Image (cartoon, rainbow, N blue to C red):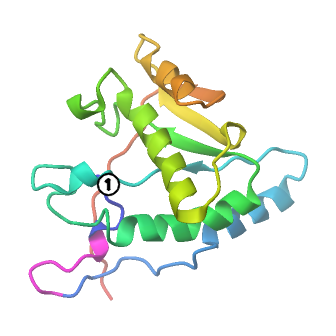
Amino acid sequence: MLCRWATDYTMHGKAPSRAATPLAPDAAARFVAAVKSLAPRSAVIPVWVTECEEADTTADGACHGVGCYRGLCWREFDKQWLPLREECEQIALALAWRTFERDLPRFGERAGWVASAITHLRARAESQHGDALPAEQLVAVVEDDGTGAGPAMARGAGVNAILVLRVALDATFQPRLRAR
């Protein structure tokens, strides 16, 4: 399951048990500003992850039938994304297509999700907020599988700055209840 919000959904009619206190929508932007103040001569580029795609909400999709695409996920993303864009000259997108298991036939070519995620994010910025997401504001963080597919997809989607991962990301997560 890809969803970072899954722990907040009601399951079997029971209220969710949160393991963390939600932060204000500008928390990421404030964090980046604080880091910038500690390292004023450094370029601070946060790494961000997009949300799921609408096709993931099917019962056999990554969201396992939770209809969040038109619900909480992207609305929460937008609340955090807009202040972050205002704070940062550049934002890196974690587009680890193999680690996130996004090398799916629906995305076409190998690593096609990389281009799809970038295109979706740009279209969303345009339709929801009326502003284009310029290529110079994005850094694509992609995996290297030896074929060059990830970087090629990022370039094809119009991203100029690309960081190629040479080590695997640890994307494991297990929700845990904490004692109160």
Residue 11 shown in magenta: yes
Q: Position of residue 108 (x, y in %)?
A: 29, 25
Task: Report whether 16 appears left or right of 161.
Answer: left
Residue 104 shown in magenta: no
Magenta span: helix, strand or loop, mainly? loop
Q: Secondary structure at mark 1?
A: loop
Image height check: is 11 above or below 111? below
> In front here: 170 or 163?
163
Image height check: is 137 above or below 75? above
Decide: few, some or many residues near mark 1? Use Cα within 10 Å; few <14, some 14-19, many ≥20: few
Task: Report whether 144 appears left or right of 4.
Answer: right
Quadrant hosting residue 102: top left
Quarter of the image that includes the C terminus:
bottom left
Task: Kindly identify which residue carries mark 1.
Answer: 173
Q: Position of residue 70 (x, y in %)?
A: 32, 67
Q: Position of residue 144 (x, y in %)?
A: 46, 20
Residue name at image x 30 percent, y 32 percent: 107
Q: Position of residue 164 (x, y in %)?
A: 55, 25
- Amino acid type shown at disc 1: Phe
Please report the bounds of the magenta region as a residue range.
7-14
Of all residues shown, which one is farthest toward the right?
Answer: 41
Task: Report whether 170 appears left or right of 126.
Answer: left
Quadrant hosting residue 88: bottom right
Of all residues shown, which one is farthest toward the top?
Answer: 147
Residue name at image x 89 percent, y 53 percent: 40
